[in-house]
Image (tube, rainbow, N blue to C red):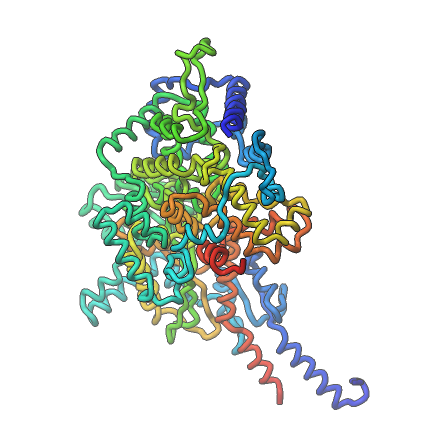
Amino acid sequence: MRKAQGSWEKRILKSLNSMCTELSIPLARKRPIGEQKELLNKWNEMGTDEPDLSHFRPVYAPKDFLEVLINLRNPNYENGDSLGFRTHLGLIQVPLKVKDIPELKELFVELGLTTGQLGIDDSTQVPPELFENEHVRIGQKVLVEQDSAAAQQYVRQGSPTALRAELWALILNISSQPEDILYYEQLKTNVIQHDLLVDSLIYKDVKLTASNDDYYFVFEDYLYQVLLCFSRDTSVLSHFAYNSASPPRSYIRGKLGIEEYAVFYPPNGVIPFHGFSMYVAPLCFLYNEPSKLYQIFREMYVRFFFRLHSISSHPSGIVSLCLLFETLLQTYLPQLFYHLREIGAQPLRISFKWMVRAFSGYLATDQLLLLWDRILGYNSLEILAVLAAAVFAFRAVNLMEVTSLAAAEAVLADLSTLKVMPLLQIFLFATVT
Amino acid sequence: MSRLKNQNYKGYGLSKGKEREQRASIRFKTTLMNTLMDVLRRRPGWVEVKDEGEWDFYWCDVSWLRENFDHTYMDEHVRISHFRNHYELTRKNYMVKNLKRFRKQLEREAGKLEAAKCDFFPKTFEMPCEYHLFVEEFRKNPGITWIMKPVARSQGKGIFLFRKLKDIMDWRKDSRCSDDQKEEIPVENYVAQRYIENPYLIGGRKFDLRVYVLVMSYIPLRAWLYRDGFARFSNTRFTLSSIDDQYVHLTNVAVQKTSPDYHPKKGCKWMLQRFRQYLASKHGPEAVESLFSDMDNIFIKSLQSVQKVIISDKHCFELYGYDILIDQDLKPWLLEVNASPSLTASSQEDYELKTCLLEDTLHIVDMEASNSLRADSYCS
């Protein structure tokens, strides 16, 4: 795994460096004073800036990453006795351990049919006295007690809209202390003073994805404020301690290869890819104070999101999620799986992009937030794979009739009307296995 | 069955056929070539008539109405999409007058508290006739911003902001400049209105809400509120320092379309549902409920204020587009009422909204019921 991650990183960095040489733009440079002043004035409306970004390309897109994952092989693997895995017909060929439905039912026990859920039991037909009112009351109590562990347990059943921002902050242990605000301001100063090549990539990504989204375009400026600061935040480097990835390095001009002149580039060690800004966009719905928004995003990234684009064997890592998805589909919807495979539409090719983005930009925002409630509650990303399988199960009838990859993509192109919790509940607890 | 042999039978058969034809089709006319045309054409049993053909249903524009309504005879079942003197509600100066009068009446009859419910309209003065009153108010509140709006234009045309009397002195001079054309060009009526300086902002941007209200009659007052609508965002960040930047302050899509930042894919709109969710996650569901019930109050009071003034012809109905601005205290303000809200779609989502809105409007107008009544009246 590490080797694969290592070579993937080399590729990304090479791509970044070549773009840099091609366009003759330095990876980093100090801004002249005039430009610094200008940027400071425009800080709250960077969205109005229209730099020429036509020559910049995203360093990579999720589908490039998928190709790398598909080609992962374990040279040491002796598949003598594991019959199950030899018959795995999906794209992922690494035999990691993934849960099956009985195990998932145990993990996600609070999503069961007899437990109240927000996203199901708060719909208009259900009288609020049955579940919602009491649930809200408990949520308020949790906030008063400032009990982080209780909050995490609580959001497994969903968080009321009005309490969500505070609950998530409690679970992620974010409290806006003066030193946090100061830290953010320092990052901001860093942005003003230095210009990084990565900044242009961020601009381009925001313009291509979030700005074009019907719902997130409003938050364009917040996205710049968060992401530009994020790329300079060296505290993010600490997450590499438990990440199989390592931060890309670069060398001061003229000192290639000399270790003393090696720096991490970008400073936070994370090279953004196409769609990266979508990790931040839904959070703008909850927080509009920039330093708080920033902290929440940073914490979400170092706890969860980084696993979605680095190669590791962690159960919440993207490789495991892909495998979990494929296994669920092959085991519980074999007809559908074989049919799609036959017509050249391997299911993972469609669902990969959903999982890499944690469904941001694909689901309606209120549904997405209900999903992310559960990610926080269970401290695991496995629910993404389960949801992806549940979506396929839901549209199985239409999918059985398609005869090409393009047609399958079309059936699954629009997820904005889906209700996440009923889908998950039916898939896990109400399907005959 | 042969129709030619028996004379009587032929006559009866013919009229029966005609009757069947009449029962089957509703003849509609409209000059609009947008969502409305799609909806009308799709409606089963509705056929388009062009040019001088007779119609049962006409979605007309206001200029046609002004010129032809008074000398057009309409059968009982015929419906037309405007009230003769809708401008009592939709022209800013008349609306203000009617509202002020209604407020006084309410204060006399029901007391100050009830009258205060009419305070959803920013202080407005008609120009040029109320100029002196305006100056008095202006001097009482130095430093605040005012907005000058032409009474009858739409799409944001001719609107500007000012803080100094000097600014409108210049404008008054300009608008009277061409002496030799004095007779032809009437001095346009404007209103000067207090500008709401603390609008509620989302993502640093100003927005207003468009809500649809269908009025089927004024006496008795029968109105329908459409559940959906949208918030229209300004493309640039809000700041009071840039009064001249029209794009910041005006949120009409028509104005935004000419802004250099405008990206057609975006459409700069949020559906009302999304707006409600956003507000609920920031202020809690009770605050949102209270905001929406304040908005209901605006619709009701504004319609009541013109109830006795508008000629309630049974042939008429009207679909109004209300423009509402929310301030930072979550108080809704009425900006204006449009008699001809745009029915052109700016995006797929918008198309769906307007399609459903128009379909529901046609369901309520229910030409099908009045059509069958008419067909019956042909049977002897």
Residue A170 in the image, given as x and y percentages of width and height: 28, 44
* In this picture, residue A367 sits left or right of residue A288: right
Comparing B73 with A1, the one in front is A1
Comparing A167 with B144, the one in front is A167
* In this picture, residue B7 sits left or right of residue B53: right
State whether residue B335 is above or below residue B165: below
Residue B71 in the image, given as x and y percentages of width and height: 51, 71
Image quadrant assignment for residue B28: bottom right
User: In percent of the image, x 33 and y 60: which residue is there?
Assistant: B292
Comparing A348 with A215, the one in front is A348
What residue occupies the far front of the structure in this picture?
A: A81
Quarter that holds the C terminus of chain A: bottom right
* In this picture, residue B133 sits left or right of residue A189: left
Residue A365 in the image, given as x and y percentages of width and height: 42, 49
Image quadrant assignment for residue A133: bottom left
**Residue B342 in sight from this viewpoint:** no
User: In percent of the image, x 39 and y 31: which residue is there?
Assistant: A242
